[in-house]
Amino acid sequence: MFGIRSSPSFEVRHDDPTDVMICGFAEFGLAGLTAVDYLTKQLELEETGHISVEQLPPITPFENGTPRHHTRLFSKPEFEYTILVGELYVPPFATESFGDAVLEYTEKNPVEEVVVLSGVPFVHESIDHRPFFVASDDYQREHDLSDHIEPMAGGFLDGINGALMQRAVDSPLRTAVFTTPVHPRIPDVDAALRLINAVTNVYDLEVDIEPLESFAAEVSRHYEELAARVEEGRTEMAHDDRMYM
């Protein structure tokens, strides 16, 4: 007999709501998560809230021996943006509940816009290495996106992105997903850079991206060296195999 999977419940706990929420989640390529985490550090934001969840396998991230909430909200005084850093993977069956919780939070507080930074895995050419948007009509009317980011030609959104955008269609909440192709390597720092450039240009935020550019170069070198070692190992194994032919 199969058990019935209960729907998880999310609760947003945040005492300092702002006009705009910029989000990044744990998903393929980690581009959005890398981008928002970098923004919190460069903008010198402080943790001012978190999102708790019940009936999902819990994780507790930690750094230097200190635990933290898996989904945290960052802001600072006289700053109109809140940044959501979501390190908890939200499975597809839970995204509707997550979207409901975020929408309920925005309705109870003066949140006017939600922007999600997200990488999308698909086969692509280097010419596709640029950011795209999917945004509600009212978001597009509010912002002149044409100078900074291109519309995604077609397709569909699923997961958290789909849940939030679906709710935006039927609510006054202005919602956008800024997306870009990602590669299998984790994290795809180049993709994170594209998302950072998109959101900082749209919102006119001043962020120094040079440290992340340097990190991206290091990541690229690491994977190039790793690929070379793997190929070298395959060649050696092939030579060894021929010894027994």
Image (cartoon, rainbow, N blue to C red):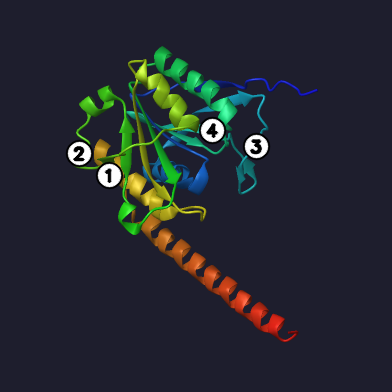
Residue at the spot 42% in from the left edge and 40% down from the top edge: 118
- The residue singled out by tag 3 in the image is 59
User: Of the residues under marks 1 and 3, which one precedes in the sequence?
Assistant: 3
How far, Cα to Cα, is label 4 from label 3? 10 Å
Residue 108 at x, y percent in the picture: 42, 12
At label 1, counting other C-alpha atoms closer than 10 Å, the crowd grade (few under 14, some 14-19, many 20 or more) is few
* Tag 2 and tag 3, C-beta contact below 8 Å: no
Residue closest to the far front: 245
- Element at label 2: loop
- The residue singled out by tag 1 in the image is 206
How far, Cα to Cα, is label 1 from label 4? 25 Å
* Tag 1 and tag 3, C-beta contact below 8 Å: no
Q: Nearer the viewer, mark 1 or mark 4?
A: 4
Say the numbered circle drawn on residue 146.
2
Q: Nearer the viewer, mark 2 or mark 3?
A: 2
- Element at label 3: loop
- The residue singled out by tag 4 in the image is 71
Q: Nearer the viewer, residue 194 or 2?
A: 2
